[in-house]
Image: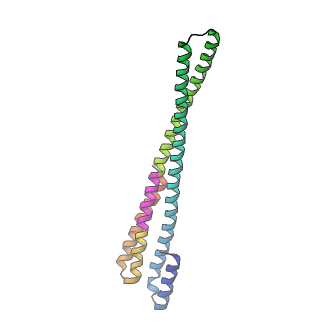
Amino acid sequence: MEPTEISEFTEQMKEGGESSLKHVSLAISVLAVLVAMVTVLGHREHTEAVLMQARATDTWNEYQAHNIRSEQMTLTSDMLTLQPSSNSAAVQDKLGEYAKHQAKWKDDLKEESDKAKEFEHEVEVAESKAVKFDMGEALLQIAVVLASITLLTRKQSFFFGGLALGIVGAIIAALGFLGH
């Protein structure tokens, strides 16, 4: 329900002398504000999940690039040891240089793997939060509709049903702040 629709309902109620439904209009307004807030939170969490997934993918790509370079260096080292050489001291120096690179890359690979796994975990947390916000949003929207039916039918059961769904939706959305 749009804010302009809420004010139109309020004006219609004043004209019709139905001040007894002011609490319904107020509740609908509060529910509409909650819907807006939960919608924004859900969108932010979905965006966070996408960004974390991109970071995880980038980190896995770096991991793979380092791993390929490490494998290529291993093959190069093997080729150097198998090829005859007139300068074995230079070959040994080069093999020592390659061994240092390999040792450093081994540590880098472990760090990149851990970082990528951490990003993947953050994706799972963000997606879990987003699901809660989405469910809360849906229930709050249904609550607004049910409470609005009260204005048309004058039956309080719709109002109380909408209020109950709104409370459940708000609780589920609040659970989104707790994370995974």
Which residues fall within the magenta stretch? 127-140
Residue shown at the point (52%, 21%) measured from the top left: 75
- Judge by depth and name the residue closer to the eye, 128 or 52: 52
Question: Does 10 lie within the magenta span?
Answer: no
Q: Is residue 39 above or below residue 50?
A: below
Left or right: residue 92 versus residue 151 is right
- Judge by depth and name the residue closer to the eye, 47 or 151: 47
Residue shown at the point (52%, 26%) measured from the top left: 71
Q: Is residue 14 above or below residue 74?
A: below
Could you tell me residue 13's position as x and y percent? 47, 87
Residue shown at the point (51%, 41%) measured from the top left: 118
Q: In this figure, which colouring scheme has been used for the structure?
A: rainbow
- Judge by depth and name the residue closer to the eye, 25 or 97: 97
Residue shown at the point (49%, 88%) measured from the top left: 14
Could you tell me residue 144's position as x and y percent? 43, 73
Could you tell me residue 62's position as x and y percent? 55, 36
Q: Main secondary structure of the magenta part?
A: helix
